[in-house]
Amino acid sequence: MKINRRSFLATGLAAAAGAVAGPAQGRAAEGSSSASSVAVVLATLLDLSKCIGCGACVEGCREANAHRYPEPVKPFPKMYPSRVKAADWSDKRDVDDRLTPYNWLYIQTASGEYDGKPFELNIPRRCLHCQNPPCANLCPWGAASKDGRGIVDINDEICLGGSKCKDVCPWHIPERQTGVGLYLKLAPSFAGNGVMYKCDRCQDRVAAGGTPACIEVCPEGVQTIGPRDDILAQARKLAEETGGFIYGDTENGGTNTFYVSPVPFDVLNQAIEKGPGRPHLASVGNPFTTEDTLARAVYAAPLAGLAAGALHLIRGAASEDDHE
Ligand code: SF4
């Protein structure tokens, strides 16, 4: 489906009536009417003791997803207010030592000393695919969503690039490219400013029964994918047998990515380079454990419920168009 200004606004206005349903109900309705309602939630286990930092996973990701990378229109529209800056990675597509709109996975390296012994560990970093993803829950336009397999995806046909997902992600994972996407058709000088990009754990490949590219090409078998309960049990067993530590099982209320490391994650977090495009490894609590926090979240994203309704209708329209 091609979404234009008229269809987007019409759909959004129509959705206003259903906004009270809220995002949770929107997704439940979507799941109950599709095959995703019976899909098994999948998780990945990354055994950091095995990673040699060869970068095959990064290359595999780039090759598998190159056809989805943004091709921005230049020059970019002038934005108002002028404090809204363009984010342009289109001339830096080769950068592979951080997350960018053209690099959805990279390897972080941590070296130091733990327990009287030196260590060097390589850590493949990407979206963790949270169980309760704030990026999807709080996107004002419902462009981000979680499917029945536990994959969190940003729809590049709906995303306006406003960066809310990046702001609310505890690791600030999504990255924006200006000059591409729906904002160019809607309000090029006032809306969003591009599209947000991140790993979708090779959603199409997984839906077709395949494996994410990064897992398929890894020569060391660092990653394992499978039903979440099984993978979590494997992660706990591995940590217990090796005296290791787990990251991702409780972070942000639980994710669908589990790292197991022989070195504690607070030590790794001290040792890694952090900053834009280079996420931390600090402990992250569950932001939805108290009513106060939830109330703040709703306040921060007043359009989320409306957007979820709009997304539901847009997807419905898309699926109708696809069948025409
Ligand atoms: Fe969303 Fe960040 Fe969680 Fe990924 S890690 S699902 S981008 S909140």
Image: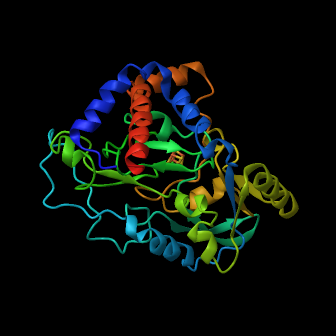
Residue at the image point whose x is 20% and y is 48% from the top: 184
x then y, percent, for residue 10: 27, 30
x then y, percent, for residue 255: 64, 47
Whether residue 282 sits left or right of residue 64 in the image: it is right
Q: Which of the two residues, 272 or 135, is positioned nearer the viewer here?
A: 135
Q: Which of the two residues, 115 or 177, is positioned nearer the viewer here?
A: 177
Q: Which of the two residues, 91 or 119, is positioned nearer the viewer here?
A: 91
Residue 140, compared with residue 178, is above or below; it is: above
x then y, percent, for residue 23: 50, 29
Residue at the image point whose x is 54% and y is 19% from the top: 292
x then y, percent, for residue 161: 31, 46
Quadrant hosting residue 49: bottom right
Residue at the image point whose x is 27% and y is 47% from the top: 182
Instruction: Please indicate, yes or no, whether residue 166 appears anywhere in the rendered image.
Output: no
Instruction: Please indicate, yes or no, whether residue 6 appears anywhere in the rendered image.
Output: yes
Quadrant hosting residue 302: top left
Residue 86, compared with residue 295, is above or below; it is: below
Whether residue 117 sits left or right of residue 135 in the image: it is right
